[in-house]
Image (tube, rainbow, N blue to C red):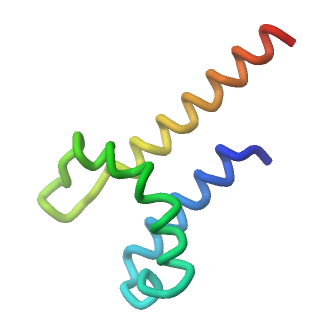
Amino acid sequence: MDLALIYQYMIIAYVLLSWLPGLRDSFIGALLSKLVEPYLAPFRRFIPSIGGVLDISPIVALFALRFVARGLIAIVEMFV
């Protein structure tokens, strides 16, 4: 399991916890917020919420993370 995959799971967990205010405010929710929110913030600046309710920036962030991770793996494999 690579670091990008672990971070993807953290983003997914953070999104799921955001739907449940009690869990979002828990220790785990606060920890995930500190780890994931700095990565999501640039995406949220450029991608507005749909109808003011649905935030699709985590989906775009997941695609970007996977794209960059696969690109880095391909570059490293070229030199190894």
In the image, farthest residue toward the top: 78
Q: Is residue 43 left or right of residue 77?
A: left
* Residue under the point 23% across and 40% down: 46
Pick the residue in front: 35 or 14: 35
* Residue under the point 46% across and 71% down: 16
* Placement of 19 over or under 52, stated as above or below: below
Quadrant containing the C terminus in the rendered view: top right
Q: Position of residue 18 (x, y in %)?
A: 39, 74
* Residue under the point 37% across and 76% down: 19
Q: Position of residue 56 (x, y in %)?
A: 31, 51
Callout count: 0
Q: Is residue 44 left or right of residue 22?
A: left
* Residue under the point 71% across and 46% down: 3
Q: Position of residue 35 (x, y in %)?
A: 52, 61
* Placement of 10 over or under 44, stated as above or below: below
* Placement of 71 over or under 10, stated as above or below: above
Q: Position of residue 72 (x, y in %)?
A: 66, 23
In the image, farthest residue toward the bottom: 22
Q: Is residue 7 left or right of residue 57?
A: right
